[in-house]
Amino acid sequence: MIDAALPPGIRGFLLDMDGTLLVGGRPLPGATELMEAIRRRGASLLVLTNNSSDRVEAFHDRLLAAGLDISPKEILSSGEATSDHLLHRTPHRRILLLGTPPLEASIEEAGLELAGPGEDAPAVVVAFDKTLTYARLEHACHLLQAGADYFATHPDVTCITPDGLIPDTGAIIAAIETVTGRTPFVIGKPERPMIDAALARLGTSAAETVLVGDQLDTDMVMAHSSGLFSVLTLTGETSAARAQAADPPPDLIINSVADLVPLAASLGQV
């Protein structure tokens, strides 16, 4: 058991998904128990994921299949946050998207128009994209060199899978920057648009919220910059050596979210 305690007044938990609650379709130790403990203490939770490859409904199905009891309203993806940002914080209604077919469908349903091959658009949005082709990458570079606005759903360079790490959105961003010199306005973790959307959904302040994740450069950076209590789990992309050498360090380092269960269960107790 971890010899630690959560700060007083905690009312909300932001839980990363991949590498924190599950890997692939497999729940990680303590995931179910943690969610149950949070709810028993009357706190709120939100699964906060930079995974923009699919629709929220698909993430919901995946979590349910892993035995994690959750509602769609308790999930916020970087793709969903990006649609919201574009619609409510920019004039753009037509974009070129480098993203998966499910993200394309989700963005169109939100009310945005997608530019087709060779078509002009005032903005380019880059996301995780296993369907990426050289032609689409070339098209994005041409629009950006012509002055299109530039956004990205999230900055993660790698994504964890049961077989190991694979290239994520940050790798595509790096390729585009090499050609164009452009860097995007990022919506997802660790940037402000994502945390603002998450806290609004939870209904808590930063001081009342814990963020649990497996990545130093997204989860922990966002927690520190936003004043959240940070909990790093070693079940994902960060080794114990890297976690201990981090500056600033996470507020709490755990082997898995199972270590957090007794702390969540004791919320509000004197």
Image: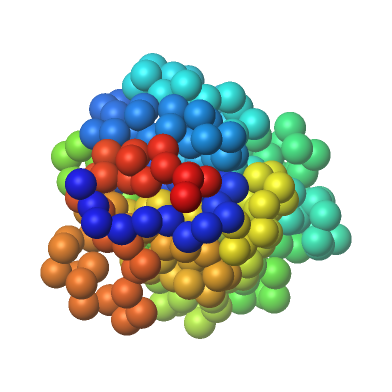
Q: Is residue 249 visible?
A: yes
Q: Is residue 100 above or below residue 195?
A: above
Q: Position of residue 33 (x, y in %)?
A: 35, 29
Relative side of 56 to 1, left or right = right
- Residue at left offset 27%, top offset 39%: 258
Relative side of 245 to 131, left or right = left
- Residue at left offset 26%, top offset 27%: 26
- Residue at left offset 29%, top offset 34%: 30
Relative side of 110 to 145, left or right = right
The image quadrant that residue 27 belongs to is top left
- Residue at left offset 32%, top offset 50%: 159
The image quadrant that residue 150 belongs to is bottom right
Q: Is residue 136 above or below residue 106?
A: below
Q: Is residue 219 visible?
A: no
Q: Position of residue 77 (x, y in %)?
A: 56, 44
Q: Position of residue 4 (x, y in %)?
A: 31, 58
Colour pattern of the rendering: rainbow
